[in-house]
Amino acid sequence: MNRGFTLVELLVVLAIVALGSASVMWSLRDSSTQQLESEAQRLCALLEAARAQSRANGVAIRWRAVDGGFVIESLQPGSPPPKTYGWLSPSTRATATYLSLGPEPIVAPQSLSLLQGDGRRGSVRISTDGLRPFSVAP
């Protein structure tokens, strides 16, 4: 009696392993790219919240990049100290130094790019035309 595997059985096992490997590879995205996109979505939401607050209160608000993160601050004298936000990844940085967020309902077109490290590992552009909300540009 022969013991062993037939060629068909080996091919079936190889096909199953190949399909499993391919599905794992496609489900795992580059973590730095995914992290950068998450950061961009988070920043868009914070920028829109600041714009809404600026319009509601009639006070100019500014977004400003700082080392390791950014600040959203009111430009009204006597306002509370600005809140500092850190980036999700320490290697993230922004290309813009500041954005004006109101209080007018229509602001000038503005954009910034978020980079991972020196920019070779990925970048994402966030922009508004002044009327529409901030969004991640393709």
Image (cartoon, rainbow, N blue to C red):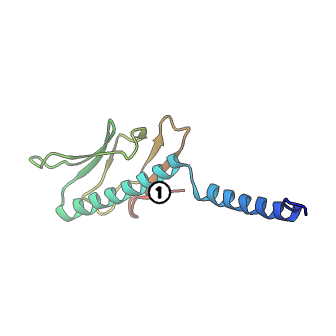
On screen, residue 5 versus residue 53, left or right, reads right
> Where 37 falls versus 81 (above or below)?
below
Quadrant of the rendered image containing residue 59: bottom left
Q: Which residue of the protein is positioned furthest toward the left in this rendering?
A: 78
Q: Kindly identify the residue that appears in the image at 56 percent across and 49 percent down.
A: 30
Q: Is residue 100 left or right of residue 77?
A: right
Q: Look at the image and tell me in which quarter the N terminus lies.
A: bottom right
Nearer to us in this view, 68 or 17: 17
Instruction: Residue at 85% x, 59% y: name it.
Output: 4
Coordinates of residue 101 in the picture (x, y in percent): 29, 54
Which quadrant of the figure has residue 49? Answer: bottom left
Q: Position of residue 55 (x, y in %)?
A: 23, 63
Of residue 30 and residue 84, the one placed in the foreground of this image is 30
Q: Is residue 1 above or below residue 96?
A: below
Few, some or many residues within 10 Å of mark 1 (<14, 14–19, 20+): some
Kind of residue sitting beneath label 1: Val
Q: Secondary structure at mark 1?
A: strand
Report the quarter where the C terminus lies.
bottom right
Which residue is drawn at the image coordinates 46% and 46% (left, top)? 113
Q: Position of residue 66 (x, y in %)?
A: 31, 38
Question: Outermost residue, right direction?
Answer: 1
Furthest residue in direction front, as rendered: 1
Tag count: 1
Q: Quadrant of residue 8?
A: bottom right
Which residue bears the numbered disc 1? 136
